[in-house]
Structure formats: C-alpha cells, structure tokens
Amino acid sequence: FGGLYTPSSNLDNAIDILTDILDRPLQTNKNIVIMGDINVNNLQESDDSNKLEGFLSCFNITRLKLPPTRITHQTTTSIDWICTNMEPDNIRTTVILTGLSDHTAQLAELNFPRHILKKTKEIRRNFSQKS
C-alpha cells in the first residue's frame, strides 16, 4: 500500500519512481494499492492519461474510476487516484466532500478473503516394542 503526490509537470519522474518500487522482487504476487494526487485528469483522455494507463497495465494494475476529486469554480477534474491489482469485488471506493480544500478525500475499503484452514484428523498406530 502506498501514497503518491506528483506535481503536474513531473509525470515521467513519478513513473520512474513507481517503476523502481513495483519492479522489486518482494512485490511479486502481492496486493498493490496506490493512492494519491497524480495530477492526471481521469475524466478526459490525454497523452498523460494514456501514458499512465499504459504504465499501469505493465504491472496488471488498473486505475479505478472516481468521480471528480478536485472541484473549483472553474474546473471539475478527477486528478486523485486509487489504483490496484486487486479484484474489483475486493475493493470499495468512496469520495468524501470534506470542505477542507478543493480536493475531496478518497477512501478505499479492502476486503481480503479469509482462507479457512481445514482441520485434519490423523490416526496413528504405534508398533514399537515399548507399546
């Protein structure tokens, strides 16, 4: 799980940093969730949004669709993100209007299925001389 802020002029640098993190062997077969302010509008197609989607797909990560996350008098954009490689049924997102800034808050609720261990019964016979 990680968070990321990217200035609007520095997407390539953010992708380089994320590549270094996601390429680590410890990330193999792990649930990944990335959240933060990426400053790439998800409501409009652009070169940056295409570059970001292409990068994420290399790691089997998708950017979840969020409603507008930054609302001003002039613009309404979705520049904050929640990205994951988890199954869509295992993550629920909520956008919260806090009134603290022109950005909303994003909440990700993760559901990790429980693996129930089956109890096993073992019967043994002891054929040693001592029994």
Image: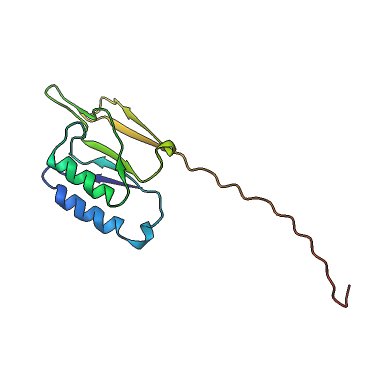
- The structure residue drawn at horizontal position 31% and vertical position 33%, both measured from the top left corner, is 106
Colour logic: rainbow
Residue 114 occupies quadrant: top right
Residue farthest to the bottom, as pictured: 129
Residue farthest to the top, as pictured: 73
Q: Quadrant of the C terminus?
A: bottom right
**Residue 48 screen position, x and y as percent:** 15, 42
Q: Is residue 17 above or below residue 68?
A: below
Q: Is residue 76 above or below residue 129?
A: above
**Residue 110 screen position, x and y as percent:** 43, 39
Q: Is residue 24 above or below residue 111?
A: below
The one of 89 and 75 positioned closer to us in this rendering: 89
Total of numbered circles in the picture? 0
**Residue 8 screen position, x and y as percent:** 13, 42
- The structure residue drawn at horizontal position 40% and vertical position 53%, both measured from the top left corner, is 30
Q: Is residue 6 visible?
A: no
Q: Is residue 57 left or right of residue 51?
A: right
**Residue 60 screen position, x and y as percent:** 32, 49
- The structure residue drawn at horizontal position 29% and vertical position 33%, both measured from the top left corner, is 65
Q: Is residue 88 visible?
A: yes
Q: Is residue 118 left or right of residue 106?
A: right
- The structure residue drawn at horizontal position 38% and vertical position 57%, both measured from the top left corner, is 28
Residue 68 occupies quadrant: top left
